[in-house]
Image (spheres, rainbow, N blue to C red):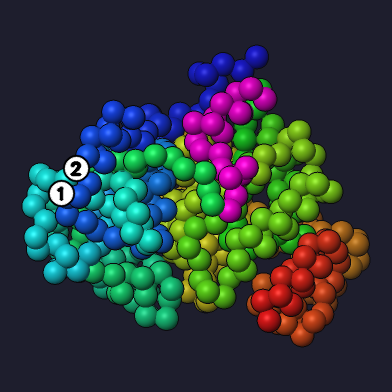
Amino acid sequence: MTTKSDLIAPHGGQLINRIATPAERDEFLAKADSLPRIQLDERATSDLVMIAIGGFSPLKGFMEQADYEKVVDDMHLVDGTAWAIPVTLSVTEEQAEPLKEGNWVRLDDQSGKFIGVLELTQKYQYNKAHEAVNVYRTDEIKHPGVKVVYDQGAINLAGPVWLLEREPHPIFPKYQIDPAESRKMFLELGWKTVVGFQTRNPIHRAHEYIQKCALEIVDGLFLHPLVGATKKDDIPADVRMRCYEIMMDKYFPQDRVILAINPSAMRYAGPREAIFHALVRKNYGCTHFIVGRDHAGVGDYYGTYDAQYIFDEFEPGELGIIPMKFEHAFYCTRTEQMATSKTSPSTKEERIHLSGTKVREMLRRGELPPSQFSRPEVAQELANAMKNQS
């Protein structure tokens, strides 16, 4: 029987919980009308949630300047803990001016609902261009992650946060499995090794192939599609989740796979985000993490396997989670199965590759992607969604 000590430790050693107790919540609600307010955008709201549920352990709040600069410059917190992406709350100078360090700040979501509290310990200016170049490897405004940085306010607010309460996800409540719960599930199932899989795209045959290759090695697979903020031209989260439901029902061994949502927002930071995604899954209890071709990439900003190479920049064991690095998978017409260049004897002409862009173009024309790219039920679901969207 698996014991608690068999589970991988959260990043930093402790699973953070910043969800207010009933007494704290009553105290915050009593102060609600007297507190200065900051309205969070979609990404900041999801960051608040991820901090509160422990998904961003060891973070207890939005980063102070020393941690922010250390992360931007060399992917570590001040205490030496590995961390690849700055998690900050940015506001305009006008919004920051009346806020006093040492005081409470009310945090509202996009609709104006009171959802959290920040204990303001610091407000500081930061260099947007420096963050863009270091984190995203470019300062081009057309990069979606860089655009977010350039569009946000010039002042970062820092300090510990509290989430008033953990509410069910408005669209996917049955798949809302937070780190404390996923860890409990892995224990009850006796899974000592668990591989996590991140995606913002609908599942296709290459995904399925590498997921099942990984499943041959570990006890369980944690399918963890991201459902937070993404680019406007990405496939909507509800469509992607329906595709995964189809796969769970027809093509995966259900006793060895758990499907859950990742409420985070995409940064599109390529290699750095691969590290970030791995550490988040470590907090959920994963011991391994799949890193495929161009993980979290966008456009042609990153090399095909840069997201794999970056793991070698850390000391052995420093990240505490094992990356499972996969080559670009394709359908091999000679062997009539999915493969990679490591396993297929085929020539270039015998390999069927379809990018997400090409698939979207096919769907817009009313064409279904071939079975070599996507399971037919998934292809039909995508076609139906595209038709409804049009």
Above or below, 59 relative to 153: above
Give the x, y percent position of residue 92.
Answer: 19, 68
Determine which of the numbered discs, if any, sits on residue 26 in the image. Answer: none
User: SS class of the residue under badge 1?
Assistant: helix
Q: Viewed as shown, does residue 168 lie left or right of 134?
A: right
Q: What range of the chain is rendered magenta?
A: 171-189
Q: Residues within 10 Å of mark 1 (few under 14, many from 20)?
A: few
Give the x, y percent position of residue 233.
Answer: 57, 75
Q: CA distance from mark 2 to mark 1?
A: 6 Å
Residue 75 forms part of the magenta stretch: no
**Furthest-bottom residue in this view:** 365
On the question of residue 280 being in view, the answer is yes
User: SS class of the residue under badge 2?
Assistant: helix
Residue 178 forms part of the magenta stretch: yes
Q: Amino acid at mark 1?
A: Ser
Q: Viewed as shown, does residue 153 lie left or right of 2?
A: left
Between residue 304 and residue 219, name the one nearer to us: 219
Q: Residues within 10 Å of mark 2 (few under 14, many from 20)?
A: few
Quarter holding the C terminus is bottom right
Check disc 1 and report the residue beneath it: 34
Between residue 300 and residue 390, name the one nearer to us: 390
* Most common SS among magenta residues: helix
Above or below, 173 relative to 331: above
Could you tell me if the residues under marks 2 and 1 are in contact, i.e. CB atoms within 8 Å?
yes
Q: Residue at x 42, y 53 (%)?
A: 46
Check disc 2 and report the residue beneath it: 31
